Image: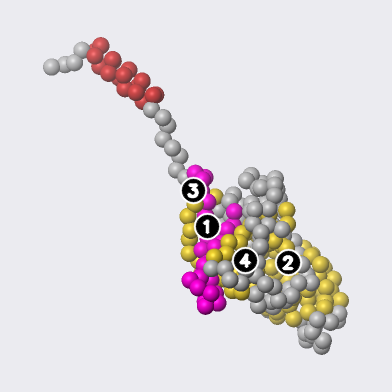
Amino acid sequence: MKRPTALILAGVAAAAVLALSRPPAAAAATDRLPDLGMARLRDLSIDTTTRPGRRLLRFTTIIVNIGAGPFETIGRRSSTDTTQMTVAQRIRTSAGTSREVSTPAVMFWAGDGHAHWHVRDVEAYRLIRLDNGRRVGTGAKHGFCYFDNTAYRLGLAGAPSAPVYGGCGRAGDLRVTTGLSVGWGDTYPAGIAFQWIDITGLNSGRYRLRAIADPANWFAETSNANNSTWVDLKLTGSAVRVVAYGPDA
């Protein structure tokens, strides 16, 4: 039997009212990933006093986070008998939740005269000859302790006005959290221990110094395409002259 038109219309209207009264479906939470980069290199010089008889190319680097969320790493070990910590990355979401993701990275204690934990090789420095593209030097520093010590781009959405992360733990710690907030960076000044490339024996000429954040791509971030910067320079004896700068993060 056919249903009366009036009843059909009434049913349609009731369904429309019910649909309007329901709350909208919640949007799926999205990851707020960091985006690591290197600020422009500066303070280049040749040091001939730290290691007599050697020529050391010194420079200042700043690793920065210009992403949508913090770059946070958590080191853990089961006891103080273990000399290294495994490292997990904590990823925040738009819903205010977070999760941890294991990484191949490790933390180790000191090793460069500093009493704190370091993440191994989270930065890399390479020197390349411009005439043939051959790598002729790598950074002496392999351990990095990063935290909010340089206000870099605080106009970014989500950037805190004051540091959130500070320090890199103590000798007896079983858990250490390090990180970079959105818009913040960590500076390694040119004069710090092992912040150099040994250029002893290199001929005078033009070279490119490149600094790379997360060179092994251990950590989740929005883009790996902007992780490095460079500076072209001319080496002559104990003098260094900058010829051109690469991109700022």
Residue range corresponding to the magenta coloring = 70-97
Report, in whole angstroms, how far the alpha carbon at label 4 lies from the one at label 3: 25 Å
- Which is more toward the observer, 217 or 134? 217
- Mark 4 and mark 2 lie on one chain; the one further toward the N terminus is 4
- Mark 4 and mark 3 lie on one chain; the one further toward the N terminus is 3
Report, in whole angstroms, how far the alpha carbon at label 3 lies from the one at label 1: 10 Å
Horizontal arrangement in the rendering, residue 135 relative to residue 236 (left or right): left
- Mark 1 and mark 4 lie on one chain; the one further toward the N terminus is 1
Q: Report the coloring of the rendering.
A: secondary structure
Report x, y in % for residue 147: 66, 60
Report x, y in % for residue 231: 76, 67
Q: Does the magenta-highlighted stretch encompass residue 121?
A: no
Q: Is residue 20 above or below residue 43?
A: above
**In this view, which residue lies farthest toward the left?**
1
Q: Are marks 1 and 4 in contact (CB under 8 Å)?
A: no
For the C terminus, the quadrant is: bottom right
Q: Is residue 134 above or below residue 75?
A: below
Secondary element at tag 2: strand
Query: Residue 188 — which label?
Result: 2
Instruction: Categorize mark 1 by other alpha carbons within 10 Å: few (<14), some (14-19), many (20+).
Output: many
Report, in whole angstroms, how far the alpha carbon at label 2 lies from the one at label 3: 32 Å
Residue picked out by circle 3? 97
Please tell me which residue is depicted at 53% across the width and 74% down the height of the picture: 80
Q: Quadrant of residue 179?
A: bottom right
Secondary element at tag 3: loop
Please tell me which residue is depicted at 65% across the width and 70% down the height of the picture: 116
Instruction: Categorize mark 2 by other alpha carbons within 10 Å: few (<14), some (14-19), many (20+).
Output: some
Residue picked out by circle 4? 169
Query: Residue 90 — which label?
Result: 1
Horizontal arrangement in the rendering, residue 76 relative to residue 157 (left or right): left
